[in-house]
Amino acid sequence: MAAEVLSAAGVAVHLFDAMPSVGRKFLLAGKGGMNLTHSEPADRFAGRYGERRHQIETLLGEFGANEVRAWALGLGIDTFVGTSGRVFPSDMKAAPLLRAWLHRLRHPQGGGPSVRFHMRHRWIGWSDDGVALCFDAPGGTFRVRPRAVVLALGGGSWARLGSNGAWVPLLVARGVAVAPLLPANCGFDIADGWSEHFLRRFAGQPFKNVSLRFTPEGGPAFERKGEFVATATGIEGSLVYAASAWLRQRIIREGSATLTLDLMPDWSVERVQREVSHPRGSRSLSSHLKSRLGLDGIKTGVLYEYLGKDGVNDTARLAGVIKALPLTLVAARPIDEAISSAGGVLFEALDDGLM
């Protein structure tokens, strides 16, 4: 984006990238559908940034969701709003958008200078005199003395795609305040892990149409409907990612975080209790839950996982757990597995122009 704006203003731009080709993480993000932005109201969208809301809100006011869609359309890529409110390219793919973007950078409208790409150039710091930027390049160390530099170094997730966080000590050594990189939009390990029986039957399967509740320290309770997946070590998926910052902070502070799942968010406690308590005759409990409540598969499995064979026969307790199943998390998954990273250069180290 910065290269595009500068080039359009007539500035000669050189873009250095550690990888052999441009946009590798962009393409990975597009697997399964390229989520460009979200269509929700601006106030709610800004609220997703937590304690940094006010800093981000100002930036979104200048270039928000509508501007992202207009930018894509300017590249010939139409967009649409999915049922979740997320915004996607009309063909759901990242590659056509990237190709159009790179073409415009190399062949700018209005006759401005082309952006020059330097691939396999990994930034490794400054020269001894602190003036030149140094890159590890195919021909050895490459030095350049630009008039201005825009750093777009990424976080620490998916290091094999280029952003490995190696820039952190370089900036810290120059006196820049940097918060440690931490996993964001990540999965979590559950306390004691899933049982072997649960793993064999349900690892990789989704919990659909559930509600997740969690109360952050000093903040309003988070509650949202959606879905997530049971993994070999715990849980991951869009509903978990939405609460991941608060969950991660609680784990760092207290060693664990307990969220609550509502397996039937569209039913009242009273209705669940009534149907669970309905005489089941000779039917098994699993058949009864499927017949009366529509519960089966992984949802029934997690009830047995939490309550055990004896506990599920206590109808009052079973109904309570269907509506409020506690799940204790003990660790975020490693940063290299995360979709993105928290941390980085502190806002307090920047001026209003992000310089």
Image (tube, rainbow, N blue to C red):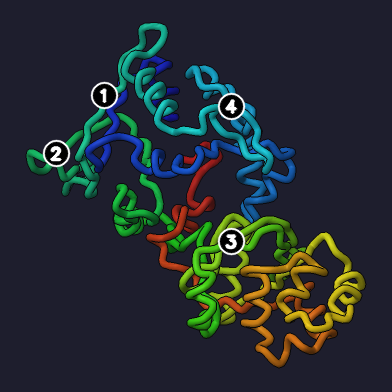
- SS at mark 4 in the image: strand
Foreground tag (1 vs 4):
4
Precedes in sequence: disc 3 or disc 2: 2
According to the image, label 2 marks what residue? 142
Alpha carbon distance from label 1 to label 2: 15 Å
Give the residue furthest to the bottom. 310
Query: Could you tell me which secondary element the residue under label 2 belongs to?
Result: strand
Instruction: Identify which amino acid the numbered label 1 is placed on.
Output: Arg
Residue type at numbered disc 3: Pro
Find residue 271 and report its image quarter: bottom right
Q: Residues within 10 Å of mark 2 (few under 14, many from 20)?
A: some
Residue 165 in the image: above or below residue 96:
below
Chain-order first, disc 1 or disc 3: 1
**Amino acid type indicated by mark 4:** Thr
Measure the C-alpha gap from mark 4 to mark 3: 27 Å
Q: x and y percent of residue 105 in the render?
A: 36, 20
